[in-house]
Every structure is written in C-alpha cells, then in structure tokens.
Image (cartoon, rainbow, N blue to C red):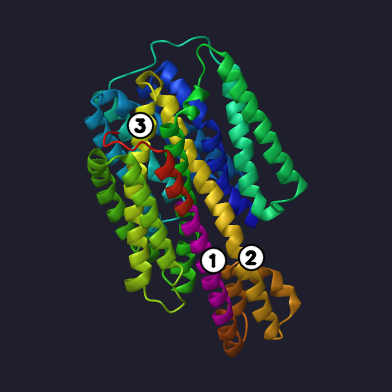
Amino acid sequence: GTTQLQWIVDAYTLVFSALLLTMGHLGDRFGRRRALQLGLLIFAVTSGLATLSTTSNQLIGARALMGIGAALIFPATLAILVNVFTDPKERAAAIGIWSAMVGVAVAIGPIAGGLLLEHFWWGSIFLVNIPVALISIALGALLLPESRDPNVGPMDYAGLVLSAAGVGLVIWAIIEAPTRGWTSPTILMAFAGSVVLLVAFALVERRLVHPMLDVLLFKNARFTAASLSIATAFFALFGFIFLITQFLQLVQGYTALQAGVRTLPFAIATGIMSPVAIALMHRFGSRAIVTLGLLVMAIGFVIAATVQVDTPYLGRVLISMVIIAAGLGLATSPATESIMGAVPPDKAGAGAAVNDTTREFGGTLGVAVVGSVFLTVYAPLAVDGYRSLGLPPEFESIVRESLAGGLGVAAKLPPDVGAQLVAITKGAFVDGLTRGSLVSAAVVAVGAIIAWKFLPTGTKS
C-alpha cells in the first residue's frame, strides 16, 4: 500500500536522523575510523537483507537498520577529515571536496538507480552497496588513521537517549504531518513531546562536565547561523527535488534513467562550485559567500516557478537546476566549514553530527512542507477538473492524491476523455510546482538574511 511504500523510504530517514548525534559522539569516544568501518559493515549486511526481502515489512525493517549504519558513517567521514587536515586552509579545502561529493551523490543516486532498475531487478539497487562498502572498509583500514577524543568522561546515557528520542520524534511528526494533518492532535502532541525531550537534553548536557554535545555551542553565532543556513538550503533543495523528479517523469514522460541523466548537470555544478566556494570564502569571508549562495538558489527556484507543462528540458528546467546547484555549492561548503571550525577537533564527531542532522532535518521538513503546499494547489484543481468531465466519484480520491494516480485513472478512460484528464492533472501539477518553488525561494531568502546578519564578516573562516 501507499503507507508501506512511504515507510520504505522514511524508515531509513527516521532512524538515520535520530541516531546521528548519538553515533557522532560514540565515534568521538571509541574511534572515528572504527565507527566508519562498523557503519559500512552494517550498511553492507543490511543492504543484503534488503535485497533478500520478500515482503514490504521486511524491506522496511532492513531500511531502518541501514539507517543505523549510515548514522555511524556520515559524522565519522567529516570528523576524520577535520583531524587529518589540521591546517585551517587544508581543512577548508577538504571540507569543500566533501561537500561537493554530497551534492554529487544527490544527483548520481537517481542515475545509478535508474540504470539498475532498467537492466536488473529492484533488489540490485541495494545489492550494489555491498561491494562498495567492503572496498571502502579495506581502503579505510589501509589509509585512514584512528582518532578519538582523549578527554572523555563517563558515558552520557541520558544524553544518548534524550537526543535520539527528541530528534526521532520530531522527524516522525514531520514525516506523518502531511498524511495525518499538521494540526491533528497526534502530530501536535508529537511536536510538543519532542520539544520537551530536546529541552531536557539541553538541561542535562549543561550540567555535565563531559557532555556528548556542548549545547553552549549554539550561543556561537557562527555555529548557529551556519547550521540554519544549511537547514534552509536543504529544506528548499529536497522540497524541490521531490517535485522536479515527478515533473520529469510524469509530466515530461522520461523514464527513471532518463530523468536521472537529466540531473547530471546538477551534480557537475555542485561539484565545481563547492571547492570554488572555499577559495572565495578565504578572500571574501564566509558571510558573503554563504549569503550569495542562498540568494543564487533563490533565483534558481524563481526560474523553476515559471516552468509550464510544455517547457522543454533544454531551457528553463535545465537553467534552474544548474543555478540551484551552483548556489548549493556556494552556500553549503563554507557553512559546513564554519560549523566544524567552531568545534574543537576532539569533538569533531559531535560537530559533524550536528551538520548532518541539520541537513536531514531541513530536507525532511522541506519534503513535508513543500509537498503539503503543492497538494493544497494540485488537489482542488485536479478534483474540480475531474468533476467537470462528469466522471464517477469513486476514482476522485485517486486523482486527488497524486499526478501518478490521475494519469492511472486517465489510462482507463476512453481516449478523448482520458486525454482531457491528463491535460487537467498535468496543469494542476505544474501550478503546484510553481507554488512549491516559490516557497523554496522564500525559505532560502530567509536563510540568506540569517547568514548575512550572523555569520562572521572577516575574510578568514
């Protein structure tokens, strides 16, 4: 069912987000290379479980376990970089390349997935993870030095539990809000509960001599503004990706592989601009470059808002994607450097976990909010159009739910009526895409204001 399909994706996101702070701290405590290799091993094993799954529930469980591995991997990668490259300029350059790889992965993933699905069976998208993870484990053992926090205190069990529960609950509420309703009692209680848990986490951490996360870091304007800048960038980005991938496949008719290939310029632009942004940061300061990057993203989203049903890919669609990607590269690598530069190297895992958590929180919230805004535009237009054709009410809810549903209903109708419904639902989708793109533009514009006001003004990071 639709709910199970949703949770095949969201089970990973929920567990990954909830455990990032915990796993970042454990990496600092027990060794970052060890955390990375353990995470890769878990990811390989659980990818195998996903490949062997025969039911939706088994696949959901495997995806949740993959989130544990990913939560170990991501903070460790950035923390290792910070401890290997101790010179500030070398560290910044390494972070620029790291940020570029994150941006490239966003675009390469759909291409690889589309290629595998076109030539193999669905399980191949998980099976391919296994050799990649095993090769990475071997290379890590040969090339990576071990590092850890030399000043650890007693295990902060309360912090581990409260952070995971608080972040996990707010992510669950964000995921479920579009389905249950943003003002439903369950969602409001979940948001309230997450606030209570995270406030309790902050109070516990402030009382400890050796906390898992020094919450006083959030008093550092550089740290907090950079975190908010990344959150707004990924809010807008993931909300837009949620819609533009559907536009390419359902409106313009590309296959999964063809749509993935058309995101390749996004990867190229991000890969180029992330290291360039670090060089510009050294000359003009992080405030100017992060602000510029977010404003460039806003311009890209405004261009995307002008796309119509018959707009060719080689035009405003491609231009908007390249501009958004360039802005992402400009904004996120200096912002990531600002976060890691504000954190002592001994606590690099915790700092990296905050960086990753802001990305996941922003991205998850972006999909939920932009998706909800889209649906408030698409659903009434699609339903009104459906009713205007005098069609039976039993299929109305399918048309209301998504463009894919509307196209599925249209395929079962007589050709002339079906063609009219296709035109109606595609037009409604593009109107929703316009509204969603404008919301993304507004969010990154707010992020630009925050970056300009609170990030450091000097020419050094």
The disc placed on residue 90 is none
| Residue farthest along the bottom direction in this orientation | 416
Does the CB distance between marks 1 and 2 fall below 8 Å?
Answer: yes
- The residue lying at 35 percent from left, 55 percent from top is 325
Residue on which disc 3 sits: 78
Q: Is residue 425 magenta?
A: yes
Front-most of 404 and 223? Answer: 223
Q: Position of residue 54 (x, y in %)?
A: 57, 47
Indicate which label's residue lies in the foreground, 1 or 3: 1
Q: Which residues, given as a range, are shown in magenta?
A: 423-444
What's the residue type where badge 3 is placed? Leu
Does the CB distance between marks 1 and 3 fall below 8 Å?
Answer: no
Q: Secondary structure at mark 3?
A: helix
Tell which circle, 1 or 3, labels the residue nearer the N-terminal end.
3
Tell which circle, 2 or 3, labels the residue nearer the N-terminal end.
3
Residue on which disc 1 sits: 435
Q: Secondary structure at mark 1?
A: helix
The disc placed on residue 376 is 2
Residue 85 sits in quarter:
top left
What's the residue type where badge 1 is placed? Arg
